[in-house]
Amino acid sequence: MTFENAQEAAIRSAIIIAIGALLVVLARWVLGRVVGRLTRAPRAKVEKTGRFTVTLGSVPVDHARIRRLKTLHQLLASTLTVVVSIIVFSVVLSEFGVDIAPLIASAGVVGVALAFGAQSVVSDLLAGLFMLVENQCNVGDRVELGALGSTLAAGTVEEVGLRVTTIRDDDGRLWYVRNGQILRVANESQGWSLAVVDIALHPDTDLNEARDLVEDLVRTALTEPALAGLVLTDREPTVRVSDISATSAVLQVRANAQPGENQRVASVLRRRLYGEFTSRGIKLA
């Protein structure tokens, strides 16, 4: 390559690098604007009747949603920068007369070797990406993560990353679960939860009378201020006989509660039921 050709190649390469840098900056700016608008946009709510509701004005901040959008923003921005940099580097080499075909072939061989060694990492990243996009769990949700025939971890989500999800269990231990190992997610904090209370009565107890008493007490308790904001008023609680044996007859109370509030509702109902049964002299098993 002559000196004049080298000068022309250097000028063209500088222009290509400048265009690539400008493209990266512009694309990252547009991506940031889009993510920012999505972060500030009000969330739509679809009711059971099919009505589509959007709340305008001042709305509570959804920190989990913001965290998920920021993670996706970082992933897309990094991927975009790497792709554009590789393309610019290849074009610049070709401007200087470098045959990039052998480099591409070598990179392909190296990529295959790395792919075999990093299959688990790629699996974790892809699984984490889909978990974020599909909103399977957010920070603060109470979940149970499982694999084939086993439970990996159960507790409160502290962080949802692309490779690892962090869970704090009831004993205070912090679990780091690789996303590629998660085959199922049981989320107690989405939609609604179910408060279940089992009452084991003495076999001599009149079930009809006890059932009527429990129904009245549960309906009254669910309207009290302590539970007013924790239960779903559009769904009636149910009381049914769940088990009968020689030693007990079990009544089961099932009440729909707000996401993650089922344990609090069940605890309040147990206290109310125990106090009422004790005052009326109804025997428990």
Image (spheres, grey):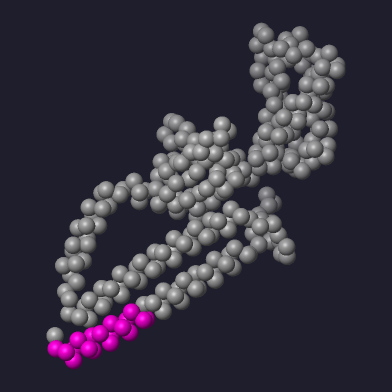
Residue 3 painted magenta: yes
Taking the spot 80% from the left edge, 26% from the top edge, the residue there is 272
Report the magenta stretch's main SS.
helix
Taking the spot 77% from the left edge, 43% from the top edge, the residue there is 229
Whether residue 181 can be seen here? yes
For residue 280, which quarter of the picture? top right
Q: Quadrant of the N terminus?
A: bottom left
**Residue 66 placed where, x, y %?**
58, 58
For residue 258, which quarter of the picture? top right
Taking the spot 58% from the left edge, 33% from the top edge, the residue there is 170
For residue 261, which quarter of the picture? top right
Q: Residue furthest bottom?
A: 4
Q: Up-down: is 247 above or below 57?
A: above
Which is nearer the eye, 111 or 252? 111
Q: Up-down: is 269 above or below 16?
A: above
**Residue 224 placed where, x, y %?**
83, 37
Q: In this view, does 275 lie to the left or right of 16?
A: right
Q: Give the range drawn in magenta.
A: 2-19
Q: Residue furthest left?
A: 1
**Residue 70 placed where, x, y %?**
52, 60
Q: Is residue 15 left or right of residue 285?
A: left
**Residue 232 placed where, x, y %?**
73, 42
Q: Quadrant of the C terminus?
A: top right
Which is nearer the eye, 84 or 147? 84
Whether residue 187 can be seen here? no
Q: In this view, does 147 lie to the left or right of 159?
A: left
Q: Up-down: is 73 above or below 232?
A: below
